[in-house]
Amino acid sequence: MRGPNWPTRSNFPTSYSCLRVSTALINWTNREVRGERQHPYLIKSRDSTAKLVYHELFAYLASQKRDPFRQHLYWECDDVENGRCDWLEIAALDTLAGAQSWQTPVNVPVKGWRNAFTPAVVTDSISNAFDFPRRSGAVRATYAANRFELTTSRVGKVRLYLSPEMVDFGRELTVVINGQNVFRGRATMDKAFTLANYRREADRQAVWVNYLELAIPARR
């Protein structure tokens, strides 16, 4: 899975102050509290350094604003269990197909790995921060004025989740995938789907009222 924030590796190297990594896809600051301290210790600690870490963490979280209806999305995954990002879901992969030229591997070379059990030991090796053992599929998607446009790479099927915040249900929707029109028509608000989806996700910021499931057409 690849998105605005990637999962971290447990023994990613840090310094006492902080390590900042910035690439096109990462805005990540990692702060370390030295010593063999478990998470419960950090929560209960009155240590000034530990307190500073949590103050910074919650200040950062408070500054972030979620927008589940962004008009532009890029999503990539190697397992459809991680295929959903807001209104876009990769429902099936086609990893036997070749990747498109815009789907390029992205990683972060890291030196100075620390041992998870003896973090004081720093190795001289250099390796990638992330391990992607399987082929992935990716989608670039946009919408505006009741029109969705998607470009896919190694994807077999997608789902588009719909909200009145995004589309006008009184007008026709158009979906174009890889330059081909795959849907043109009216979508309706489905009460049963809306309620079932809300019970499952309990998301008060994004209420999805229906979805479209679309197979990726063969490229011409």
Image (cartoon, rainbow, N blue to C red):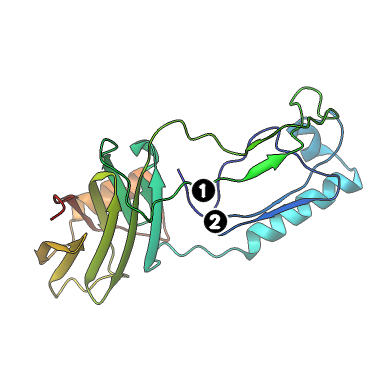
Mark 2, residues whose alpha carbon is within 10 Å: few (<14), some, or many (≥20)? few
Query: Mark 1: which amino acid?
Result: Val
Q: Is residue 218 shown to the viewer in this render? A: yes
x, y percentage for residue 40?
A: 75, 32
Q: Which mark is residue 106?
A: 1
- Residue 162: which quarter of the image? bottom left
Q: Which mark is residue 25?
A: 2
- Residue 156: which quarter of the image? top left
**Which residue is painted at 40% across and 48% down in the image?**
76
- The mark tally for this picture is 2
Query: Mark 2: which amino acid?
Result: Leu
Of residues 212 and 21, the one nearer the viewer is 21
Do labels 1 and 2 touch, CB within 8 Å?
Answer: yes
Gap in angstroms between the C-alphas marked 1 and 2 = 9 Å
Q: Point out the tag, 1 or 2, that comes first from the N-terminus.
A: 2
x, y percentage for residue 107?
A: 56, 45
Q: Which mark is residue 56?
A: none
**Which secondary structure, mark 1?**
loop
Q: Is residue 202 shown to the viewer in this render? A: no
